[in-house]
């Protein structure tokens, strides 16, 4: 069972996974060994899936961010198609979606020429019916859902 303290721990780790157990303990009012045990429990239960370095893709020369909607000819090969899309160089994320399109891809490319190569690779998949791509102009960091504040407070009602 996840309690409010666990949610606060998850908030802190989501913001900075390199925080020490001692620092998290100080922030939530527990001992470092208690924090260690809670984090291990969250890892073992699968709530914490891993720890990752957050990269500045622009600093690495990947200056273009794009999102591509993918529609399919045949829904029978959906899981296989999702795996093939995920294995395509340049594709960072694959999301199965509801609506007209089956997948939403997040792409990172050096330039429009590389974007064209990625889109050509996606469109070569025999089950792909078509794509629609939008280019992100600026990426803004979001804080996340605020787990320690979960469930979120209801929005204030507007007067009639």
Image: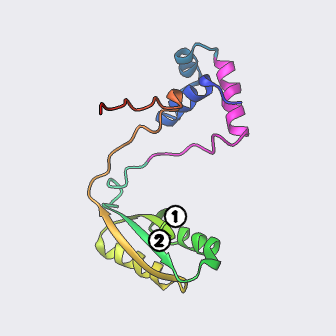
Q: Residue furthest front?
A: 160
What residue did someone put label 2 on?
101
Q: Examine the structure image and report whether residue 38 is included in the region drawn in magenta.
A: yes
Residue segment shown in magenta: 32-54
Q: Residues within 10 Å of mark 1 (few under 14, many from 20)?
A: few
**What numbered label is drawn on residue 98?**
1
Residue pictured at 53% horizontal, 83% vertical: 73
Q: List x then y, in percent, for residue 44.
A: 73, 39
Residue pictured at 32% horizontal, 55% vertical: 58
Mark 2 residue element: loop
Mark 1 residue element: loop
Q: List x then y, in percent, for residue 154.
A: 45, 31
- Mark 1–mark 2 Cα distance, whole angstroms, equals 7 Å
Would you identify the image quadrant in which residue 115 lies?
Answer: bottom left
Q: Examine the structure image and report whether residue 75 is included in the region drawn in magenta.
A: no
* In contact (CB < 8 Å): disc 1 and disc 2: no
Q: List x then y, in percent, for residue 19.
A: 52, 28
- Relative to 80, is 152 above or below? above
Q: List x then y, in percent, for residue 125.
A: 52, 83
Q: Residue furthest left?
A: 137
- Relative to 98, is 150 above or below? above
What quarter of the picture does the C terminus occupy? top left
């Amino acid at each position: 069972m996840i309690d409010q303290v666990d949610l606060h721990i998850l908030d802190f780790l989501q913001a900075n996974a390199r925080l020490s157990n001692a620092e998290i303990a100080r922030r939530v009012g527990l001992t470092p060994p208690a924090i260690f045990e809670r984090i291990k429990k969250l890892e073992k239960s699968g709530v914490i899936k891993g720890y990752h370095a957050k990269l500045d893709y622009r600093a690495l020369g990947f200056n273009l961010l794009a999102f591509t909607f993918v529609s399919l000819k045949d829904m029978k090969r959906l899981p296989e198609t999702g795996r093939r899309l995920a294995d395509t160089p340049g594709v960072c994320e694959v999301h199965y979606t509801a609506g007209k399109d089956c997948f939403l891809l997040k792409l990172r490319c050096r330039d429009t020429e590389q974007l064209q190569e990625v889109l050509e690779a996606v469109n070569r998949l025999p089950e792909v019916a078509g794509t629609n791509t939008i280019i992100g102009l600026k990426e803004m960091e979001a804080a996340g859902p605020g787990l320690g504040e979960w469930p979120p407070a209801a929005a204030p009602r507007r007067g009639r």
